[in-house]
Amino acid sequence: MAIREIVKYPAPILEQKCKEVVKFDRKLATLLDDMYETMVAADGVGLAAPQIGEAVRVAIVDLGEGEDVIEMVNPVVTAIGGSEVEVEGCLSFPGLYGEVERPFFVRIEAQERDGSLYELEAEDYEARAILHEIDHLNGVLFDSKIIRVVDPSEFEEANEETDQKEGGHQ
């Protein structure tokens, strides 16, 4: 496993539609392992293959909190529902945060690293992260969906208010 360099905007690979994975081999397993190591090192919750220079339909999401890592090979969105606006960031856009409207619910079909098919339903933040990564595989970047740019200081103020209400520190 290796930590790879994260590709930053405006690198052309970020706006390409990625190729479907057809070989489920050791190379794919290594790519998924490298993506996980890279995402953790960058303190991210998701990463798509083009963000490390590979134009293939592979993405991962890990919300932590004891949840399993979601590995998505050739993911397809089969259903969406609801809508909410939340703040997002992206490892390929360091320092940029913005309010983005996305579905509250998503159902996908994807393949595991061994090629087996699975279906997954997700809501709220997990759905948002999955859709953000699938957008990357289609060459769609979150900056094109930003309704309002959010200054990072707004996060700090919100966290301080939460700490004061709860009487604790993070």
Image (cartoon, rainbow, N blue to C red):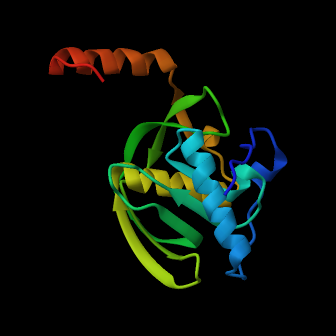
Name the side, left or right, on which 170 lies relative to 108. left
In this view, the residue in front, 9 or 164, is 164
Quadrant containing the C terminus in the rendered view: top left
Q: Quadrant of residue 27?
A: bottom right
Task: Examine the rendered structure and indicate whether residue 48 appears above or below residue 43.
Answer: below
Name the side, left or right, on which 56 lies relative to 98. right
Q: How many marks?
A: 0
Is residue 38 among what the camera can see?
Answer: yes
Residue extending farthest to the front is 1
Q: Residue at x 75, y 38 (%)?
A: 9
Residue extending farthest to the right is 12
Q: Position of residue 58 (x, y in %)?
A: 64, 65
Task: Examine the rendered structure and indicate whether residue 79 appears above or below residue 44.
Answer: below
Q: Position of residue 70 (x, y in %)?
A: 47, 63
Q: Residue at x 39, y 54 (%)?
A: 126
Task: Examine the rendered structure and indicate whether residue 97 appears above or below residue 105.
Answer: above
Q: Residue at x 26, y 19 (%)?
A: 169
Q: Position of residue 71 (x, y in %)?
A: 52, 66
Quadrant containing the N terminus in the rendered view: bottom right
Q: Residue at x 74, y 62 (%)?
A: 17
Q: Quadrant of residue 92?
A: top right
Residue extending farthest to the bottom is 116
Is residue 103 among what the camera can see?
Answer: no
Task: Examine the rendered structure and indicate whether residue 170 appears above or below residue 85.
Answer: above
Name the side, left or right, on which 61 lies relative to 134. left
Q: Position of residue 42 (x, y in %)?
A: 59, 39
